[in-house]
Image: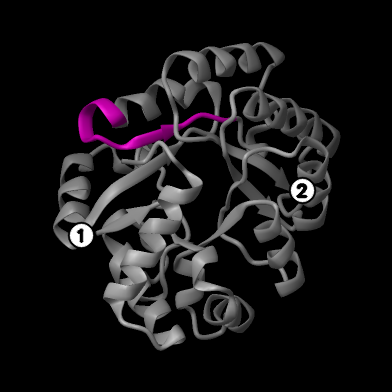
Amino acid sequence: MWIDTHCHLDAPEFAADRDEVVAAARLAGVQQIVVPAVSEATFADALTMRTRYGCFPAFGLHPIYTAVHRDEHLLTLQHYLEQHQPVAVGEIGLDFYVPNLDATRQVELLEAQLKLARDFDLPVLLHLRRAQDPLLKYLRKWRVKGGIAHAFNGSLQQAEVFISLGFKLGFGGAMTYSGSQRIRKLARDLPLEALVMETDAPDIPPAWLDRQRNQPSELVRMAEVLAELRGISLEELAAATSANARAVLPRLL
């Protein structure tokens, strides 16, 4: 069995054929899907993915959408954490890649959400594009219950610090590109117990989709790439990454 630890199944890109997308994922062997909300406006949609498909929602305010987040959305987030038993707080984090995002506001929202995660004893799903070291600074400050560093692409040294803080590292479409040598080396060399699988669908499509929409059924083919990189069987990888996901997200069944 496979677990997709990061899939935006609630995204509008799936509106026309979401039932078929979920059916294809199940047929491929992806039995559990974590759906992280990205804004207050999507909290209810992420929750609907649990009602309709048995997915596992997380709730958070994504750093890319800082301009639309309001302080009162943190109160809504707190309500959802209290009432709806998410697997994590997320997707949260920092993004210093996208131009013209308010860095100060990103940090304010990150710290507020790390505090909520600590208060509710929940792990976090981290977005950390071009922001590994700043995120580590705030994780040391707030000491949450670990979580997943989504789409990890930092250095080996940064990876080791995330692992020491209780985090697993998410790998998916980016490692399928032959030119992504640094990510592929990390995927090959990091301890197996530190890795989880993810698609980030509909984003970060694997090499063979040629920039088309990604979807959770692609997870198994991504896993084949990882298994080949590590020289292990697909069965061993499935067992390990699923166990890792459950270890860091205890509310997964």
Query: Residue 53 shows which numbered tag?
Result: none
Q: How is the image coloured?
A: one colour
The percent coordinates of residue 163 (x first, y second) are 65, 60
Circle 1: is it few (<14), some (14-19), or many (20+) Cα within 10 Å? some
Asked if residue 210 can be seen in this view, the reply is: yes
Q: Residue furthest bottom?
A: 231
Q: Is residue 175 left or right of residue 73?
A: left
Please state which of residues 117 and 53 is positioned toward the viewer in this rendering: 117
Q: Residue at x 49, y 72 (%)?
A: 192
Give the image location of residue 28, x and y in percent: 19, 62
Q: Is residue 83 magenta?
A: no
Q: Quadrant of residue 211?
A: bottom left
Q: Is residue 83 above or below residue 166?
A: above
Three-letter residue code for mark 1: Gly
Whole-number angstrom distance, CA of label 1 to CA of label 2: 33 Å
Residue 200 in view in this figure:
no
- Please give the name of the residue rendered at 39% of the width and 29% of the height, measured from the top-left corner: 46
- In the figure, is residue 192 to the left or right of 27? right
Establish if 115 lies above or below 90: above
**In terms of sequence position, does the residue under pointer 1 or pointer 2 come before the other?**
1
Magenta residues, start to end: 50-60
In terms of depth relative to the viewer, which is nearer, 105 or 195?
A: 195
Where residue 29 sits, quadrant-wise, is bottom left
- According to the picture, the residue beneath numbered tag 2 turns out to be 135
Amino acid carrying mark 2 in the image: Leu
Q: Quarter holding the N terminus? A: bottom left
Image coordinates of residue 105 in percent, x first then y, are 80, 30
Callout 2 crowding tier (Cα within 10 Å): few <14, some 14–19, many ≥20: many
Q: Secondary structure at mark 2?
A: helix
Tag 1 residue: 29
